Image (cartoon, grey):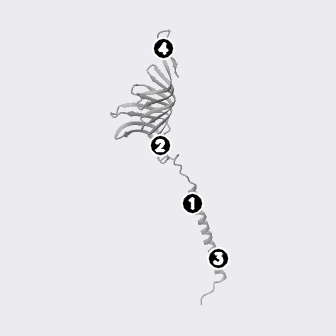
C-alpha cells in the first residue's frame, strides 16, 4: 500500500516547485534582457568602416596598367555604405601616370573622398594640382570624375604658370589638365613699373 505524503514532504515539494518557478522566471527575464540588448545594437553602415590602414603608400592599376600612386596617413574604407566610398582624413597625395608610367599630374589635398562605384574623387581643403606643363591649380574644393575623364570645381580657382596667374570662380578641365576653361575668369598679369627691374602683378577682370 503506497505511503501518503506527509506534511513535511508536501512542504519540500512546494519549496522545490517554487524554486523551479523562480529559476524559470529569472531565465526568462535574462533571455528577454539579452534579446532586448541585441535589438538595441544598431550597425550604422554609413559610419562604420570595413577596413583601416595607416601610413599608406600604394600603386593602383586600371585595366592591368599602373595608373596611380597614393600616399596618405590614414585610409578608411566604407564598403557597406549605401554609396560605398573611401575616406582619406589626413592629407592625401596622388600621382597620375600615363600608359608608359610617365607622370601626368600630381594632386594634394587636406582631405579626400573616393566614391567607388562612381569612380569620383572629392578633394577638400588646400587642393593643389600640377600638370605635366608645370601649371599649378589651387582651390578649396575639386572633383575628379574618372568615368567622365574630367576635373571640375565651382569654387574660386587660381591657375599659375610662370609669372602669369589666372583666377576665377569655377572651372572644368580634361583629367590631364591640358584643356580647361574658367567660368567666371579674371587674369592677374605681370607688368613693369619704374624702376625697370621691379615687377608687380596687376589684375584684369572680365565678366
| Residue 34 lies in quadrant | bottom right
Indicate the secondary structure of the residue bearing disc 1: helix
Q: Earlier in the sequence, mark 1 or mark 4?
A: 1
| Residues marked 2 and 1 touching at CB (< 8 Å) | no
Element on which disc 4 rests: strand
C-alpha distance separating marks 2 and 1: 33 Å
Res 151 → quadrant: top left
Q: Nearer the viewer, mark 2 or mark 3?
A: 2
| Residue identified by numbered label 4 | 191
Residue under label 3: 14
* 178 sits to left or right of 28: left
Looking at marks 3 and 1 on the same chain, the residue that comes earlier in the sequence is marked by 3
Pick whichever of labels 4 and 2 is earlier in the sequence: 2
Q: Nearer the viewer, residue 129 or 25?
A: 129
Q: Residue at x 61, y 64 (%)?
A: 29
Q: Nearer the viewer, mark 2 or mark 1?
A: 2
Q: Which residue is mark 1?
A: 35
Q: Mark 2 highlights which residue?
A: 85
Amino acid at each position: 500500500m503506497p505511503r501518503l505524503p506527509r506534511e513535511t514532504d508536501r512542504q519540500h515539494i512546494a519549496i522545490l516547485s517554487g524554486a523551479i518557478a523562480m529559476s524559470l522566471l529569472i531565465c526568462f527575464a535574462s533571455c528577454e534582457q539579452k534579446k532586448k540588448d541585441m535589438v538595441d545594437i544598431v550597425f550604422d553602415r554609413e559610419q562604420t568602416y570595413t577596413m583601416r590602414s595607416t601610413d599608406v603608400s600604394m600603386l593602383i592599376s586600371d585595366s592591368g596598367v599602373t595608373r596611380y600612386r597614393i600616399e596618405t596617413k590614414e585610409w578608411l574604407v566604407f564598403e557597406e555604405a549605401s554609396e560605398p566610398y573611401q575616406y582619406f582624413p589626413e592629407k592625401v597625395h596622388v600621382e597620375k601616370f600615363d600608359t608608359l608610367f610617365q607622370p601626368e599630374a600630381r594632386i594634394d589635398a587636406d582631405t579626400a573622398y573616393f566614391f567607388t562605384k562612381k569612380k569620383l574623387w572629392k578633394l577638400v581643403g588646400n587642393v593643389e594640382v600640377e600638370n605635366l606643363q608645370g601649371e599649378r591649380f589651387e582651390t578649396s574644393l575639386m572633383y575628379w570624375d574618372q568615368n567622365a575623364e574630367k576635373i571640375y570645381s565651382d569654387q574660386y580657382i587660381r591657375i599659375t604658370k610662370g609669372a602669369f596667374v589666372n583666377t576665377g570662380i569655377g572651372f572644368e578641365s580634361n583629367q590631364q589638365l591640358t584643356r580647361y576653361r574658367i567660368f567666371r575668369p579674371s587674369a592677374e598679369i605681370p607688368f613693369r613699373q619704374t624702376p625697370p627691374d621691379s615687377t608687380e602683378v596687376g589684375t584684369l577682370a572680365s565678366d
